Image (cartoon, rainbow, N blue to C red):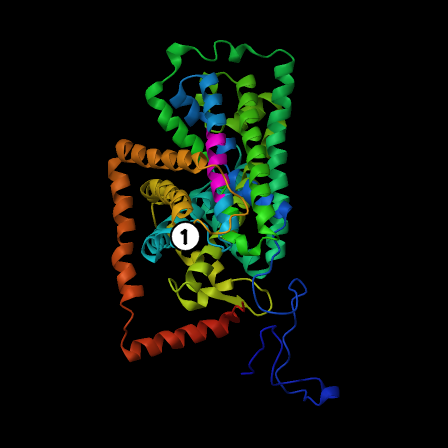
Amino acid sequence: MTRRSVNGEGTGVNNNPQNGGHPGDTPVPKEDPDSPHGKVELKKKVTLLRGISIIIGTIIGAGIFISPKGILKNSGSVGMSLVVWIACGVLSLFGALSYAELGTSIKKSGGHYTYILEAFGPQMAFIRLWADIIAIRPAGLAVISLAFGQYILEPIFMPCGVPEIAIKLATSIGITSVMYLNSMSTSWTNRIQIFLTFCKLLAVATIIVPGLYMLFKGETRNFENAFEVSNIKLTGLPLAFYSGMYAYSGWFYLNFVTEEVENPEKTVPLAICISMAIVTSCYVLTNVAYYTVMSAEELLASQSVAVTFAEKTMGNFSVAVPVFVALSCFGTMNGCLFAFSRMFYVASREGHLPEVLSMIHVRRHTPLAAVIILYPMTVFQLFVGDIYSLLNFMSFLRWLFIGVAVLGLIYMRYTRPDMPRPFKVPLFIPAIFSLTCFFMVFLSLYSDPVNTGIGFAISLTGIPAYYIFIVFDRRPKWLQKSLDSINRSVQIILEVIPAEH
């Protein structure tokens, strides 16, 4: 086999007869026009617009279209539910600003994993990675993909229900297409993400515009006594905040790809601030539009709030709403996978995952192995596992480790005071946000101790795994030789080589 150079061209064989080559020699691989010539590495292709599309495209999923009723149910009144939406937007902005400081001072991709690694060392970072790779990420991707499969088929099967096997087949096609896109081109992945983000904002606008039009015409009866004290449920407010923070989650995904961001010192904070302002405005105005058209009772009774809203305001056009929801889910799948793969790439580079995951395709300049590692686990969970139960086990871990990462920001302010910090937030911002995260973890332990305990136990299996796979790495020679052989074979099949730095 002809050895290839780092830019994908043959090093020892020239098959151009005019230059002395021979027609029978191994042909020089064609350079992908999307990939710049030069070193094989992840290129800085994430501009400000692409950064905004990654954040907005992953935050706005199916939730705002399907079930904003969780916040209304637990807050007890229309007015208080809007207060919760605004407050969760502000709290999420605090978390995003904290991550903006982390992302500009630690210019490595990987998000939560990287920040925990820098602040608290490899063992805690590995436990986070372990929980991510064995359960959280495959289950999360499978759930949003199932929503895509459900809503992309709904207009075809209306008014009947969609068969479960059809949903799973459509879901498998959706997952496969997202994996293929992320494997082939970083530029096209980002271009598609911008398009899908535009579709999401268009879908939100189709709800906001008619809703506000009716509000300005005087449809305000559903806002009368919006803050009726007798309806407000103080005991349910923590659960309402939990639902709201979950709806805003996704503001951290740009930090997973920091190394590919152009001028990260300016782009990361700016993209985060613009995105959070847009998302918070969209969420609040969308809920105002819902309440303009539907009473609190109608909203709580609806299975799909956006569909009910469209039926009341748009007539036959309501059939387009499931398509918008499906596109929204596809955008979330695309953005999430783009971010996850970079975390696995960085973890492999740090020695916490097999070496092949930190290698780059010789022509496409994508971390191909890191992209496709989730594919078999996601499809397996899709057809076999109880994904929703798994997500219940793991939901609190998300906030636990995000809280730990933000706590690491405060910790490093004292342990590494000389670290360059191009963007620095007041200390009360990470303090309030980390306390919020730990409060939500405590809330999970209180409201659902069984599932939370199971999730905690699953994450703790990362401790023996760390010692088995990372610390005690003295393997028999025959086993190490077999692993090296497998690694080389995968490297040849996938056409990946170590990235240059």
Please tell me whether mark 1 sits on a helix, a strand or a loop. helix
Q: Is residue 380 visible?
A: no
**Residue appearing at x 38%, y 48% in the figure:** 136
**Residue appearing at x 68%, y 65% in the figure:** 33
**As rendered, which of 245 and 288 lies closer to the eye?**
245
The type of residue carrying mark 1 is Tyr
**Residue appearing at x 27%, y 34% in the figure:** 448
Please determine whether, in this image, residue 105 is positioned above or below residue 277: below
**Residue appearing at x 27%, y 62% in the figure:** 467
Q: Name the residue under label 1.
A: 113
- With 499 as the anchor, is 236 left or right in this view? left
Residue 138 location (% of width, % of height)? 41, 51
Residue 237 location (% of width, % of height)? 37, 23
Assess whether residue 95 is covered by the magenta stretch.
Answer: yes
Please determine whether, in this image, residue 344 is positioned above or below residue 206: below
Q: Farthest residue in the front direction?
A: 418
Give, as a single range, the part of the protein colored magenta. 88-99
Assess whether residue 3 is covered by the magenta stretch.
Answer: no
**As rendered, which of 302 and 101 lies closer to the eye?**
101
- With 118 as the anchor, is 176 left or right in this view? right
Residue 239 location (% of width, % of height)? 36, 28
